[in-house]
Image (cartoon, rainbow, N blue to C red):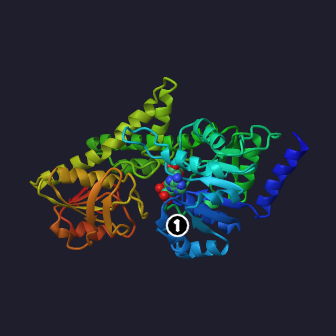
Amino acid sequence: MTTASVNRLAGLIARIDSREACIGIVGMGYVGLPLALLFSDQRFKVTGFDIEPSKVKTLNAGKSYILHILPSEIQAAQKAGFRATSDYSEIARMDAVIICVPTPLNEHHEPDLSFVTGTVKSIAPWLREGQLIVLESTTYPGTTEEIVVPLLEAGNSGGLKVSRSLDQFGLHVAFSPEREDPGNTDVARHDIPKVIGGCGPAATQLASAMYGAIFRRVVPVSSPSVAEMTKLLENIYRCVNIALVNELKQLCMRMGIDIHEVIDAAKTKPFGFQAFYPGPGLGGHCIPIDPFYLSWKAKQFDFRTRFIDVAGEINTAMPYFVIEQIAAGLNEQRKSIKGSKILVLGVAYKRDIDDLRESPSLTIIELLREKGALVAYNDPFFATVGRGRHYDLNMNNTPLDNLGQYDAVVIVTDHSSYDYRAIVEQSQLVVDTRNATKGIDSAKIVRC
Ligand SMILES: NC(=O)c1ccc[n+]([C@@H]2O[C@H](COP(=O)([O-])OP(=O)(O)OC[C@H]3O[C@@H](n4cnc5c(N)ncnc54)[C@H](O)[C@@H]3O)[C@@H](O)[C@H]2O)c1
């Protein structure tokens, strides 16, 4: 290792330690914005980049567009130097650039990396020697090395190359997966260990110094691919285990056994068991999507990821199973779905959050409408539900009163503000997909 490169790397780490380092975060969404606040909390000067002008405007006005982030938090960050911009030329001023843009699936259920490639192409012309670039967006193993690095090297005007050894001082590139769990108040963000895989030892050291300033523990791994695969293992583990309990729930229903009582008993085992809960289907940006990034990549290796396929099949079928249960409940009352008035409780994909991406409620509402039901919804977090990538509902929130007018009330999201006892008392039929009515004894409830 040459003395010059040692000194330059030490200089960058010193800028992090002294908080002189400027941090740029590209993508001010559910991941990027909280991360920006975490850096601001630790007195870094943070610039948030986003292509959506309304987000830039809102943030610079000291306001928030994410429910669990308060305007006061944005304003406190502004006092520490936080600002938002759409101007990529500011990338040149940054010591580190962290990319937190979406990684959805396209219409063929394949990875859509267009947001990542778009971002990388936009920042590349502004890069300078020594900068650290970290991808946080969830993706398949190989993305950083095969997609991001070539675009960065081809797109910068100074002929900069990615540093591969400690005596090569160029661009420092790493992958570090995000482990955000929206709505989880049990674990503080800075207590969630941060996995880091650099393209070379200098990138891993630099990224470890940067994240070490805001997270209590960093976990360096040997390569970006290991870090990318780590994130997918975590999410596939959840996806497969949720599918397992969703399948066992259906068996238990046939056998007259309460799956929730079974899970509660099983989780008393102090080792070798982790509780997962059945529900109406997967939701959110991660679990329904990320596993398919790996199954797509596996095909390049002539390999079939059977667990992912089976879990996907079971979880995707859950909203259809809920429809069958609604039909069965109505059938007991000599009614059909067609023509019935049905209220869906909760459109968010999980309890107490304002995010409806991939929410099973959207599929359930669409299926009920297709079958001729008159569907309304209530959700304290959504005044309206319009149009998204996979739905076009155009509905307004319905007040939670006069529940007796509905032929069925379907609990899809178990928001904690709902009074479930009152809901059961006032309704003709309650279909509960979340065990929200646990402990309430009533013949009106169909638990599924
Ligand atoms: N939301 C979560 O709980 C969560 C958890 C772990 C990992 N992730 C992963 O993190 C990544 C980001 O997810 P998210 O939930 O924050 O998405 P998001 O949609 O909330 O935010 C992404 C932001 O990026 C912006 N953007 C898109 N293209 C851009 C570009 N070229 N330049 C600048 N800004 C651009 C969008 O306008 C948006 O504000 C995804 O890969 C996701 O899988 C999300």
| In the displayed structure image, the side of residue 370 where residue 432 appears, left or right | right
* Vertical relation: 175 (above or below) 31: above
Residue 216 visible in the picture: no
Q: Secondary structure at mark 1?
A: helix
Q: What residue would you read off at disc 1?
A: 56
Q: Position of residue 163 (x, y in %)?
A: 74, 40
Tell me what residue is drawn at x 45 percent, y 48 percent. Answer: 276
Question: Quadrant location of the N terminus?
Answer: top right
Tell me what residue is drawn at x 42 percent, y 45 percent. Answer: 288
Would you say the beta carbon of the disc 1 residue lies within 8 angstroms of ligand 1? no
For badge 1, the amino acid type reads Val
Q: Position of residue 334 (x, y in %)?
A: 9, 54
| In the displayed structure image, the side of residue 413 where residue 8 appears, left or right | right
In the foreground, 155 or 320:
155
In the foreground, 10 or 319:
10
In the displayed orientation, state which residue is furthest to the top: 302
| Disc 1 packing (10 Å; few <14; some 14–19; many ≥20) | some
Tell me what residue is drawn at x 44 percent, y 33 percent. Answer: 307
In the displayed orientation, state which residue is furthest to the left: 334
